[in-house]
Image (cartoon, rainbow, N blue to C red):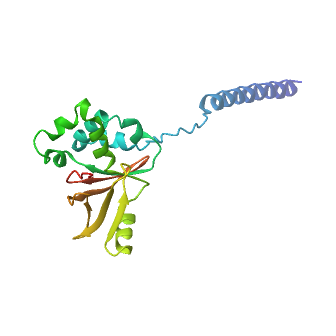
Amino acid sequence: MTVVKTISTLLLVGVIATSCGDKKKSESTEMTDTTAVAVDTTVVVETPNIVGVAAGNDDFSTLVAAVKAAELVETLSSEGPFTVFAPNNAAFAALPAGTVETLLKPESLDKLKSILTYHVVAGKFDAAAVTDAITKNNGKFTVTTVQGGKIDLSLKDGKVMLTDANGGTSTVILADVAASNGVIHAIDKVVMPK
């Protein structure tokens, strides 16, 4: 009987030890069980429209002021697409003294709109497309601006040149500035319609 008691006691101790071990193992699994969560940290940055791009570049501050004064912000922020030959601050500064100040006055609204829209072409034409069009048209490609006037585009020393209706010229000094509704090409002189 002692042998039976001893065996029973050993079995009981084994069952208790095993169940405690299982309980610890179960608790341990519950405590260390983690769920992996994927977090997308990709930040999507939208390209601003033409007005936003120009406003974000200090070298176009005069142009932005003129666009606001001419009430063209909404137009140049629309879907487009547009190609803008954008005079930089130095181009506006090269105009005769007092010209910019006079153009920014409310009474000059129509003239300012005419000048600014003369720098805009409907459609998106990157530098490669412009160069290709010039080459395929015997060195000169004429575009009609949003203002209604025409500008001749040509190449000189590998750079795109603009010739306005008065014979004035300007050079593209920075091409293919992307905008959500078109493209901007910075130019070194203000071109003028007739």
Q: Is residue 170 left or right of residue 138?
A: left
Q: Which quadrant of the rendered structure holds the N terminus? A: top right
Query: Residue 39: where, in percent of width, then height?
Result: 53, 38
Count of numbered badges drawn on the protein = 0
Q: Residue at x 36, y 38 (%)?
A: 72
| Residue found at the far right of this picture | 1
Place residue 70 in its image quadrant: top left
Q: Is residue 95 left or right of residue 80?
A: left
| Residue found at the far left of this picture | 97
Q: Residue at x 37, y 65 (%)?
A: 128
Instruction: Using the rendered image of the protein, determine whether residue 56 is visible from the camera's viewpoint.
Output: no
Instruction: Using the rendered image of the protein, determine whether residue 104 is visible from the camera's viewpoint.
Output: yes
Q: Residue at x 21, y 37 (%)?
A: 103
Observer-nearest of 112 and 56: 112
Query: Residue 132: where, in percent of width, then height?
Result: 38, 70
Query: Residue 26: where, in percent of width, then height?
Result: 69, 29
